[in-house]
Each structure stands twice: as structure tokens, then as C-alpha cells.
Image: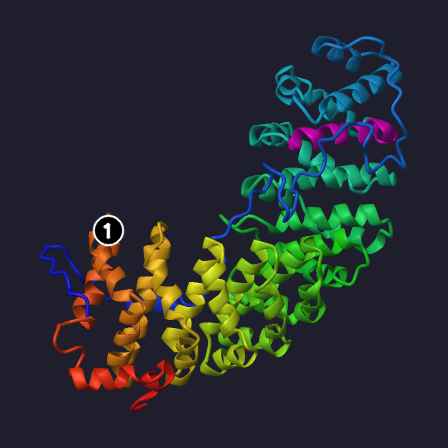
């Protein structure tokens, strides 16, 4: 046995006394997961949808190649003068020029445009005196869309000039181009964060979008409407008013049956944001029949659908035991083998997180995961996983150690989990080390209740766990030092006699397999 290093210190070692908090943390919602809303391209979703070359528009079926009829580059002063012209044709030409200028993928002069004071002039074109001039409304809405795809300050400039209610009015336009572009502009504004989102919600947009979604057959319009709804559902600090979005839930669930992948993807994202909250919100989503409609998407190859669908189901599993059972009854565990071995790390991470929440449930729920042969895959994930994936796998193991039966823990230990598990005590990631220490303490604490503590200690030592624990007493983190010291002091005392076993008993135990070692006297 390694010689235990003695440490004398005035520091407090009572680091495991708050057990209530630990048990509350067993089933974890996605509070630690944030998604960049508008700043960068991500595989998961693009919140900003249009800041493109003017000739590459999804609305080209309505708007052929623009002929600007301007043979020189316009300055901001020229642009302002043109917008004040008495010629409607010249005004429209200037709006098209501004739209094209702001659609540049590189160096769109959004700040210069705002500082020149052009925004208030655009508002004039959206007022009632231009109601019959849909070309003006279309160009202005597109310009506002591109400005809202810039910085948060750019978006706030749009809000300050009173654009939101004018854009909401355009949703009733008989010209589908105008309606779609207004939807897109409002979606970009809402995607900027909680304050802009709530500003859009405050103008009664949800009933209008719901009505449009049910009456519009144009697929591109449906794509934009569902995407805007998803942006109205997102952001958590604070979350949107759930009651305002409640009428959209049955419609979003219905959209899961759509044959367009973008509509399905954005519906999944919207529902994933709405389920990322209290158990009461999760229950509303369950009662809308969401799982019945979404579960099939856990086996698709398209990750733009798979990832948000997995998050919806994962959020349901993060609820109470009854809600977790609901997901299990719909067969979520049969998808996890594939998801835990997926080629995409975000998929594996979310699948491991989902499994960790199943392991935080009842003994029957833990057994259901075992019966689906998920323990060997969990061991493999811990061996080979990305750091973020390993953390979720470690949580799953911790939860089994905390709430599983002796036999269930024995099955996991028999698979050789302790060696890679204890090996993560050497991780450079502080939080990872803390998670493993919490799990070891749980395993040993429960073992002291069921009489298997001595056997568990031997297995941890054989996995080099004690060596790693002693090394952690030199860790720079005060918390890790205290946690490691507390475990060693409490469970690994003595040299000639180990944990209540004399040397003859130890030799006898070491001749047995891990499973028999763990199951003696159980």
C-alpha cells in the first residue's frame, strides 16, 4: 500500500457537509449551456438570417436582379438628398442602393448609415402615406433587416427610432415580399437578446405570427415565421413570458410534421428553448404531444434537426421523475446507443447529459438504462471522450454511485470504470477534478452504509485512485485540496491494516474477481 502523506493545516476539511445541494444537483437542466445568439456562424443555428449580397436573395422569385440606374458611387449625403427628393422613382432607387450597400458580406457601413441620420427617414416610408407603395416598404424592411444583423448597438438604434410597431404593421401586408421581410427583420431584432426580444413581444406579434403560419402556404414564409418564433422563445436571463408564447406551442408541434427541414429544425429549436426551464413549462410541452412528434428525429442524420430534437427530449428528462418516465416510455433509451457513439461531439455531449439525468432518477430508471446496454458505452465515452463529454459521463457515473443499488454499482465497476474515472483526477480542468472527487465521496459514503466500503477502497487503490488523491493535496485549488484530504482522512486510514481487513483477508480478497470482491457480504 502507498504510504499516506500526512498534511497538517489549519484549513477546514468539512467540504462535503452540504449534501442537500448535491442531491438537488443530480438532475441538471441546461443552466450551464448558452448559445451565441447572433454573433457567429454555428452548426446549431444561425440567428441572423440576412446580411448578404443583394443579388443572392431567397426572395429573388419576387425581386429580379436590381437595376439601380446609378452610374456613380453615392455618398451618405447624396443618399439623404435622394431620399428627400420629390421624385418617387429617385427615392426608390436610393433605397435600393442603400439596401445593396448594407447587404455587403464585408464591411457593410451600418454605423456610418446610422450616424448619418438615415434611420428616421426610413420610418417615414413605413408610415400610412406610403401604404400603397409596397416596393418602398420592402426595401426599407430589408435595410432594417441588415442593420439588425449588426451589433447590439445597431439593433438598439432601430428600436429607438420606433421601427418595431411599424414592422409589426407590415405583417398584415397583402404583398408577401413585404410580410416575409418584416418577419425577418423582427426575427433579427428578437435574436439580439432578452431586451430586444421582449420589445418585439410587447407589440403583440405572437398572435399575428400564429395566424400567418396557419394561413400561409408559401414554404419560405413558413421558414421565416417559425424561425422568428424560435428567436422569441430563446434567451434565458431572463426567459420570455411563457404565457405570451403558450398559444404557439400546439402550432410548433404541428410544424414538426412539416416536410421542409428548415421548418422542422426551427420548430425543434423553439421547443428546446421553451422546455429549458421549470418542470411546469416542461409539462405543458409534454401535454401538447411533443414527444410523440419529435422522437423520430433522434435517428436522423441531419444535425440541424437532431441536435435541437435531442435537447427537447433531454430537457424533458431533466424534469421530475414522472416527466423522465414519460420520455422513457416513448423509448428514448433505445436511441442512446447510436447517439453516444455519434461522430459529432455536441450530439454525444447532449446524449451523455441526457443519460446523466436518467441516472439521477429512480432505481427502476437506472435499471432501464442498464438493460439497454448503456454502461459499456458509458465506460467507452469516459475513456475516449472529449473533455466536455467526459464531464457529462462523469455526472452519469456519479448519479449511479449515489442512487443505484449495490448490484447496479457492481455492474458498472465490473466493467472497469474506476481506472479511467480515477484517472480524471489528473485532469487539468478544475471542475472535472471536483466532479470526480464528489463522485468518489458519494461512492464511499454509500458503501459505508451497505458494508462494502473496505472493498471499494481496495478497488480505488488498485485503480491508482489513492495515489491521485494524495497528489491532489498539493493542488493549487483550496477546494480540491480540502476535498481530496477529506476523502483520504475519512476512508484511507492506516498502513498495516486496511479499512478493517487484516493482511490475510486482503490476500484472500485479491484472489477474487472485482465482481465477487464487491459483492461479498451483500
Q: Residues within 10 Å of mark 1 (few under 14, many from 20)?
A: some
The percent position of residue 490, horizontal first and vertical second, equals 18, 70
Residue 205 visible at all: no
Residue at the spot 79% in from the left edge and 21% down from the top edge? 95
The percent position of residue 251, horizontal first and vertical second, equals 74, 60
For residue 328, side relative to residue 504 (left or right): right
For residue 25, side relative to residue 255 (left or right): left
Is 144 a magenta residue? Answer: yes
Is 444 a magenta residue? Answer: no
Vertical comparison of 178 with 330: above or below = above
Residue 503 visible at all: yes
- Residue range highlighted in magenta: 130-149
For residue 352, side relative to residue 142 (left or right): left
Which SS class for mark 1? Answer: loop
Query: Along the line of sight, which residue is nearer the eye, 270 or 398?
Result: 398
Residue at the spot 59% in from the left edge and 74% down from the top edge? 333
The percent position of residue 307, horizontal first and vertical second, equals 63, 57
Total number of numbered discs in the rendering? 1
Specify the principal SS of the magenta part.
helix
> In the orientation shown, which residue stands out farthest toward the bottom?
521
Residue at the spot 57% in from the left edge and 78% down from the top edge? 372
Vertical comparison of 486 with 370: above or below = above
Q: Dot 1 corresponds to which residue?
A: 475
Amino acid at each position: 500500500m502507498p504510504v499516506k502523506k500526512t498534511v497538517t493545516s489549519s484549513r477546514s476539511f468539512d467540504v462535503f457537509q452540504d449534501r442537500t445541494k448535491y442531491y438537488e444537483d443530480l438532475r441538471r437542466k441546461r443552466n450551464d449551456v448558452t448559445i451565441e445568439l447572433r454573433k457567429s456562424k454555428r452548426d446549431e443555428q444561425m440567428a441572423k438570417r440576412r446580411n448578404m449580397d443583394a443579388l443572392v436573395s431567397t426572395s429573388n422569385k419576387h425581386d429580379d436582379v436590381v437595376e439601380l440606374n446609378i452610374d456613380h458611387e453615392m455618398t451618405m449625403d447624396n443618399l439623404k438628398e435622394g431620399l428627400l427628393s420629390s421624385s418617387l422613382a429617385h427615392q426608390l432607387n436610393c433605397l435600393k442602393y442603400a439596401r445593396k450597400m448594407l447587404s455587403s458580406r464585408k464591411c457593410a457601413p451600418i454605423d456610418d448609415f446610422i450616424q448619418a441620420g438615415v434611420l428616421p427617414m426610413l420610418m417615414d416610408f413605413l408610415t400610412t402615406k406610403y401604404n400603397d407603395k409596397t416596393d418602398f416598404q420592402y426595401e426599407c424592411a430589408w435595410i432594417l433587416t441588415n442593420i439588425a444583423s449588426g451589433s447590439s448597438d445597431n439593433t438598439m438604434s432601430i428600436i429607438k427610432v420606433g421601427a418595431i410597431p411599424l414592422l409589426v404593421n407590415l405583417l398584415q401586408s397583402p404583398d408577401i415580399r413585404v410580410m416575409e421581410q418584416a418577419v425577418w427583420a423582427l426575427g433579427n431584432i428578437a435574436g439580439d437578446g432578452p431586451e430586444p426580444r421582449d420589445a418585439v413581444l410587447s407589440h403583440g406579434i405572437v398572435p399575428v405570427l400564429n395566424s400567418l403560419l396557419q394561413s400561409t402556404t408559401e414554404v419560405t414564409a413558413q421558414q421565416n415565421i417559425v424561425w422568428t418564433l424560435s428567436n422569441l422563445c430563446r434567451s434565458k436571463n431572463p426567459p420570455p413570458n411563457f404565457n405570451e408564447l403558450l398559444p404557439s406551442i400546439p402550432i410548433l408541434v404541428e410544424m414538426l410534421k412539416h416536410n421542409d427541414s428548415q421548418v422542422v429544425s426551427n420548430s425543434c429549436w423553439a421547443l428546446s428553448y421553451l422546455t429549458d426551464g421549470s418542470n411546469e413549462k416542461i409539462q405543458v410541452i409534454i401535454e401538447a404531444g411533443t414527444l410523440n412528434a419529435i422522437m423520430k428525429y433522434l435517428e436522423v442524420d441531419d444535425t440541424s434537426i437532431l441536435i435541437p430534437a435531442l435537447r427537447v427530449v433531454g430537457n424533458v428528462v431533466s424534469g421530475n421523475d414522472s416527466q423522465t418516465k414519460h420520455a422513457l416510455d416513448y423509448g428514448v433509451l433505445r436511441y442512446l446507443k447510436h447517439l453516444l457513439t455519434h461522430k459529432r461531439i455536441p450530439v454525444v455531449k447532449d446524449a451523455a447529459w441526457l443519460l446523466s439525468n436518467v441516472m439521477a432518477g429512480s432505481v427502476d430508471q437506472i435499471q432501464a438504462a442498464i438493460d439497454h446496454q448503456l454502461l459499456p458505452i458509458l465506460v467507452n465515452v469516459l475513456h475516449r471522450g472529449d473533455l466536455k463529454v467526459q464531464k457529462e459521463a462523469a455526472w452519469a457515473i456519479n448519479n449511479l454511485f449515489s442512487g443505484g443499488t449495490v448490484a447496479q454499482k457492481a455492474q458498472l465497476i465490473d466493467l472497469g470504470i474506476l481506472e479511467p474515472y480515477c484517472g480524471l483526477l489528473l485532469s487539468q480542468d478544475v471542475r472535472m477534478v471536483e466532479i470526480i472527487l464528489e463522485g468518489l465521496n458519494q461512492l464511499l459514503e454509500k458503501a459505508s452504509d451497505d458494508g462494502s466500503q473496505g472493498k471499494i477502497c481496495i478497488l480505488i487503490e488498485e485503480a491508482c485512485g489513492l495515489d491521485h488523491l494524495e497528489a491532489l493535496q498539493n493542488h493549487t485549488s483550496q477546494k480540491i485540496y480540502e476535498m481530496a484530504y477529506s476523502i483520504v482522512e475519512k476512508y484511507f486510514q492506516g498502513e498495516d491494516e486496511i479499512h478493517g481487513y487484516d493482511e490475510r483477508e486482503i490476500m484472500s480478497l485479491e484472489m477474487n474477481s472485482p465482481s465477487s470482491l464487491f459483492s461479498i457480504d451483500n
